[in-house]
Image (cartoon, grey):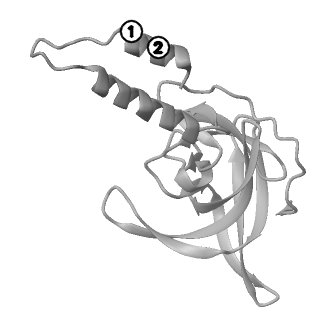
Amino acid sequence: MCSSMLAVMFAKDRTSSRGRRLLPVGLGVALMISSAASASQGKDIFGWVEHVLVGKTRLSMKAKLDTGAETSSLDALEIKKFRRSGKRWVEFVVADSDAGRRVSFKKPLLREVRIKRHDGRSQLRPVVAIEICLGDHLKRVQVSLTDRSEFLYPVLLGRRALEGIAVVDPELSLTSIPGCREQPEHEDAS
């Protein structure tokens, strides 16, 4: 916390109508704000919806940044599991509707996760790792694959994807343009 902020707080030491000093409360709040600010150092502030680039092909998509969700999900079509050299893999298609193109991916299957839907039913989804560029941050993210065509945003980034890089301000949206410079991971995309 800056010293000028503390000086103002001390200068405005007031007494409430009941004769209690308000300074300890104000100082406590200021210390909490200072603690939160230092905890977010090195992270960028993003809005609740942002542009992201997905995979080696850098598909441009909109993502909902959801701190209420632990895991992330990606809108995928034609999801097919198969075996390659004894290992489980997944083939799927991701559509970039803005550019009017579809990209096919083949990725190792990391695991399957059971997701409880809003209607109470559960759904078994394959999980793969894929690189996602948010702002200047390129991160390998585990995403569950599902048909998100009924949602506004084809990508949902949960807490695991956001940790260490992002603070989400729900009053903001579309604050950054993805600009990752690192080399993308090798992935099978055709």
* Vertical placement of residue 38 versus 139, above or below: above
Residue of label 2: 7
Q: Are marks 1 and 2 in contact (CB under 8 Å)?
A: yes
Nearest the viewer among 146 and 130 is 130
* Vertical placement of residue 90 versus 75, above or below: below
Distance CA(mark 1)–CA(mark 2): 6 Å
Q: Which label sits on residue 32?
A: none
* Vertical placement of residue 115 versus 151, above or below: below
Q: Is residue 158 visible?
A: no
* Vertical placement of residue 139 versus 20, above or below: below
Nearest the viewer among 155 and 169 is 169
Q: Position of residue 36 (x, y in %)?
A: 49, 37
Describe residue 44's horizontal placement relative to residue 18 as left or right: right
Q: Is residue 8 visible?
A: yes
- Three-letter code for the amino acid on which mark 2 is drawn: Ala
Q: Quick one: which residue is furthest to the bottom in this view?
A: 86
Q: Residue at x 47, y 13 (%)?
A: 7
Q: Residues within 10 Å of mark 2 (few under 14, many from 20)?
A: few
Describe residue 145's horizontal placement relative to residue 115 as left or right: right
Q: Residue at x 84, y 49 (%)?
A: 57
Q: Position of residue 154 (x, y in %)?
A: 59, 45
- Three-letter code for the amino acid on which mark 1 is drawn: Ala
Q: Secondary structure at mark 2?
A: helix
Rendering quarter of residue 118:
bottom left
Q: Residue at x 12, y 15 (%)?
A: 19
Q: Secondary structure at mark 1?
A: helix
Q: Residue at x 60, y 32 (%)?
A: 46
Q: Position of residue 102 (x, y in %)?
A: 76, 49
Residue of label 1: 11
Rendering quarter of residue 121:
bottom left
